[in-house]
Amino acid sequence: MSTGFASRFRLVLLVTVVLGCFGAFGLRLAWLHVVNREELLSDITRMRRQMLVEKSQRGDIRDARGTVLATSHAVRILGVDPFVLRPEDEPKWPQLAALLGRPESEIRRIFSTKYRLGVPAPAATAASAETTDAAASPVRIRFNPSGRSAATPSVATGDEEGTDAGLALEEADPAGRRPIRWVKLDDNVSETRYAEIERLGIHGVYGQLVYRRAYPNNELAAHVLGYVNREQQPVAGMELFADFYLRGQDGWRLGERDGRNRELAQFRSRDVPKADGYTVFLTIDALVQDIVEQELTAIAARFQPQKATIIVSDTRTGFILGLANYPTFNPNEYNRVPRDEMDRFRNIAVADVYEPGSVFKIVAAAAALEERLVNPSTAFDCSQDRVEYRGRVLRLPGDDHVFDHPLTVAEIVARSSNRGAARLGMLLGEQRLYRYARGFGFGAPLGFPVGGEVAGTLAEPKDWDSLTITRLPMGHAVDCTALQMHQAMSTIANGGVLLRPQIVRRIHDAAGDVVFYREEGIEVGRAVSVETARTVALLLMGVASRQGTAPEAAIRREGVDYHVAGKTGTTQKLVRETRPDGTSRLVYTNKHHVASFVGFFPATAGPGERQVAISVIVDDAKVNTPGGTAYGSIVAAPSFKHIGEQLIPILDIKPPENRTLIRPDLFAATHGGSR
């Protein structure tokens, strides 16, 4: 039977098709929502869920005046997902290439390469990181937590600094092709340049915020600061020592995103704010540090030494105001130091040792005075080359000058008599000489926190040979760091108390609140009494007088004598000598020396008045003198004077009043030496 155009058959067929479609939809919905619900729900949750990481900023390192020595600045790691690039954005590619400073052809090649064939290699170079030839691990991508666009993935294996291969790959398809979902374009895009790139609106080009370490003053205080590598890991110096305070803590939040990778704030379930690093203020004064480093540059140009160190500190607190070494390095370019010049990274002020030579005579003189075995006027016959000691005849060390009259203790110090120092050592005996040397800080680390401090060598008396009692008082048979010798001299300046050298003044949190503050010094122990320290200081004033070994160190400004107390040192270096039988031994050479001047001023500063200690130590300087001897008076003392004169206005060092109880010229000999 027909019902016109719509026959019964057609109606049945139509109903059957419609019901079949609804049935199919129903079955599919049942499969999705019932049978396969858990698996699909897991995929959806994984795709929608995201953890957004908010990078913390590493804290600054500043000097005592607040000058920034190390800081972190924001940069962007710029990348592209070739799969989400839009044809309508292609005209903007030349502008992007110009902003990146790269050839347009290279940008087009990167943007148009979406697949890579074959199994990727395990590593890649920086150059290959930007091309389809780069290697990467076969991993799936995860989306960048910045949530700026749908094409903001970051690599799951590699760090935020782009030290990975430079591209991210999906798993291979059946044809063996691996989709490239991320290629690094630049890992150091400034925020200003990134804003220009964003204005281009190229879909698929994205940037991730990271912080990079910068040292605004380049080499200034490099050995104190250390550096942070490209992975933002501290390697040396204060960066490593104070990393707990400097590094900060990244923030993060859990939430969901929509199909365009935009965060859905209403679904945010956890929010942990970031905590930026603390600011560390050093005792270093950038002005003082600059003076020190300029003087080292002048020393290097004039004497071409193997190495050199200058240290400046406040004697009252032990605060280090300036510490520098030659050679040095630029923390901004640490990776450009040639492999054969890696010693540039060594903080030789605390990591290398040397025999202090005549500067060490302050220990023997102070010990003999403290034990009341002598007074400044006690005289010794220093013309003899041999002397009897405990039933043995010992050969005394030589002197640069022959003395035709007995020398007083004051003259022994002023003229730097080796034989006079040996006589003081023998008067003390092994045990007392050793005990006082330890009391001045030799043979043990001082606790300086950066640079890999070593203890130096001071053998116990049971290990001494027969000559040690005559050589140790003149600074042989002992080695120390430049900082140890510096602190020993500061002990005399500080009234006989050995202080621990300090480098951290205070620490502020991200809000500016003080969490650590150091106002006073830390005592290690008392070496000698205040009276003995004052007497030795007066004796040391004779060294910088016209009759002493280092008149070149005297500081006069506007007609005022600033009363320098100090000691020269000229030490022969030990070199390896090969014997005729093929064996070798260490012997002293008269061709290579360590020249030094260690002192302080004003020597007569009163309580509350500024007093600074300065050490200048130059290893193997080339000088044009008879025999090529690099005397401390020639190499180091002038630098002491030059630095001291510049420090007077910077540190507001007041002219000393007439507090000298005994005239130093009464102690000084009538003829100066050259040591």
Image: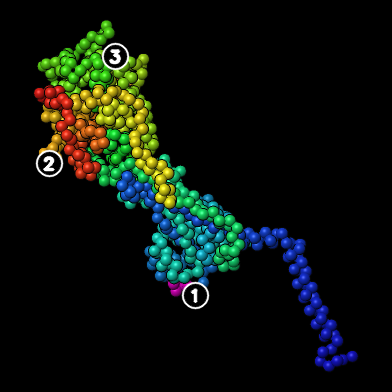
Label 2 neighbourhood size at 10 Å, few (<14), some (14-19), many (20+)? few
Where is the C terminus found, in terms of image quarters? top left
Judging from the image, what secondary structure is the residue with disc 2 in? loop
- Of tags 2 and 1, which is closer to the observer? 2
**Residue ID at (73%, 65%):** 32
Residue type highlighted by circle 2? Glu
**Mark 2 or mark 1, earlier in chain:** 1
**Mark 2 or mark 3, earlier in chain:** 3
Left or right of residue 58, residue 362 in this image: left
Q: Residue furthest right?
A: 1
Label 1 neighbourhood size at 10 Å, few (<14), some (14-19), many (20+)? few
- Of tags 2 and 3, which is closer to the observer? 2
Q: Residue furthest bottom?
A: 4
Tell me where residue 437 appears, x and y as whole percent. Answer: 31, 22
What is the distance, in whole Å, between disc 2 and disc 1 at their CAs? 76 Å
The one of 231 and 574 positioned closer to us in this rendering: 231
Q: Residue beneath label 2, please?
A: 558
Q: Are marks 2 and 1 in contact (CB under 8 Å)?
A: no
Tell me where residue 478 appears, x and y as whole percent. Answer: 31, 23
**Residue ID at (41%, 62%):** 191
Q: Quadrant of residue 554?
A: top left
The one of 226 and 344 positioned closer to us in this rendering: 226
Give the residues drawn in magenta, as a range.
87-93
Count of numbered badges drawn on the protein: 3
Q: Residue beneath label 1, please?
A: 88
What is the distance, in whole Å, between disc 2 and disc 3 at their CAs? 46 Å
**Residue ID at (41%, 42%):** 516
Q: Residue beneath label 3, please?
A: 429
Residue type highlighted by circle 1? Glu
Q: Quadrant of residue 365?
A: top left
Left or right of residue 87, residue 447 in this image: left
